[in-house]
Image (spheres, helix red, strand yellow):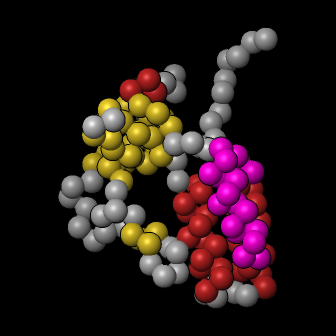
Amino acid sequence: FWSGVNLARALKKEHQGIEAQRLIVDLIARSRRVHGPDHPDTLWAEGVGEDITLRKFTIGNYAQMYDYQITGYSNDSQDEYTLFGPIDERVMEHQSSGRLMQPTNMEWVTKTTARIEDGMLDSGTPVIVRGLTG
């Protein structure tokens, strides 16, 4: 089980986000069935799953960059993201269980939009491509 979770993490780092997500979802389901939802292994796998499924979008230049969580598209043409953030160590705190925690004081976190060309996706983030013709 632990090797499978670590493999999912490695797949995400190697830009294979879809495969990583499929694997971690399967492992979480198996762990819930075998160990139960409150078992430390299940909670750890769920925390890793949250890391893997987080869709990050980075805005800024090399001197000052900010990561945001993509929550969806903000228009019908799907050329603009709705973002939540910025995400940093104040937002994404890892506990010993590996679960991600949101802070209790969220006034510095904002919801905004950005065009696709204004930033870059985190490596390994799955995307849907539409309208390509070959």
Q: Is residue 69 above or below residue 60?
A: below
Q: Is residue 15 magenta?
A: yes
Instruction: Report the side of 102 relative to 99 (left or right).
Output: left
Residue 133: quarter of image: top right
Q: Residue at x 27, y 54 (%)?
A: 109
Q: Residue at x 36, y 54 (%)?
A: 87
Residue at the far left: name it. 107
Residue 21 visible here: no
Residue 76 is situated, as x and y percent measured from the top left of the image, at 50, 26
Q: Provide the residue span drawn in magenta.
A: 1-19
Residue 61: quarter of image: top left
State the residue in front, 111 or 17.
17
Q: Residue at x 37, y 31 (%)?
A: 114
Tell me which secondary structure the magenta stretch mostly adopts: helix
- Which quarter of the rendered picture does the N terminus lie within? bottom right
Q: Is residue 30 above or below residue 57?
A: below
State the residue in front, 98 or 76.
98
Q: Residue at x 56, y 70 (%)?
A: 47
Residue at the far front: name it. 63
- Which quarter of the rendered picture does the C terminus lie within? top right
Residue 100 is situated, as x and y percent measured from the top left of the image, at 46, 69
Residue 27: quarter of image: bottom right
Q: Is residue 67 above or below residue 107?
A: above
Residue 18 visible here: yes
Residue at the far top: name it. 134
Q: Is residue 82 magenta?
A: no
Residue 37 is situated, as x and y percent measured from the top left of the image, at 65, 83
